[in-house]
Amino acid sequence: MTAATANQVTELFALAFHDDPTWSWAFPDRERRLEQHRVWWGLHVRSALRHGWVWMTEDGGAASLWIPPGEPELSAKEEARVVPLLRELLGPHSKDVLTLLDRFESNHPSGEPHYYLSLLGTHPDHRGRGKGIGLLAANLARIDELGLPAYLESSNRGNDHRYEQLGFVQVGEFAAPGGEPTIACMWRDPAGDPEET
């Protein structure tokens, strides 16, 4: 993936998560949110490129970012930037967002190797056409070929049923500081797994 494509994916995620319940809570200033999201998601996209599991549809309508089994979501260099970056972007609210990030981490399954869907987004101009879920289904077909499970967090609970249609099952739940919004932890065993037949 080229730097230009990585920038396009970052912009897609910034737009896709602009009104997401969890990530609009994390970045509450609507006037500054788009630019903050560009910085925040850009960090994740650049870090994930080394894994070769960042995908975008040909028309730029949807993108996904996966972390392969056993790999960290952020490189050590980018992980070191998280606290100062959030403090710069969010001021005092960064403390609550860091608590939320700790909850993402502590609820993440640590036993069985799996692919982790860190981000899945649809460009607002392409919503309602099944592009995001279509990209996810294609990604899952690749992961099924490898015989591995997949894990994601649903930051918009309105999408839970879409993930369930592709075989994900809710295995946990946690909330942002203050009790809302909530995030679902969802797991999917590989299709054709011997235990399922």
Image: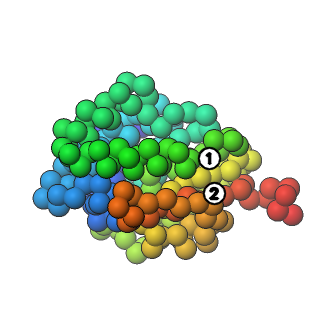
Report the disc number at residue 109: 1
Residue 6 locus on image (x, y percent):
34, 41
Tag 2–tag 1 contact (CB < 8 Å): yes
In front: 166, or 138?
166
Quick one: SS at disc 2?
strand
Quadrant of the drawing holding the C terminus: bottom right
Residue 48 locus on image (x, y percent):
44, 37
Q: Is residue 78 left or right of residue 140?
A: left
Query: Image height check: is 102 above or below 19?
Result: above
Task: Say if residue 38 shows up in the picture.
Answer: no
Query: Image height check: is 28 above or below 85?
Result: below
Residue marked by disc 2: 187
Image point (44%, 44%), residue name: 102
Residue 159 locus on image (x, y percent):
48, 70
- Pointer 2 local density, CA inside 10 Å: few below 14, some 14–19, many at least 20: many
Please state which amino acid type lies under the numbered disc 2. Answer: Trp
Image point (18%, 44%), residue name: 91
Query: Image height check: is 31 above or below 65?
Result: below
> In 3D space, how far apart are the residues under numbered discs 2 and 1 (Cα atoms)?
9 Å
Task: Say if residue 63 shows up in the picture.
Answer: yes
Quadrant of the drawing holding the N terminus: top left
Report the disc number at residue 36: none
Question: Which residue, as the protein is rendered here, is positioned at the far front?
Answer: 178
Question: Which residue, as the protein is rendered here, is positioned at the far top?
Answer: 77
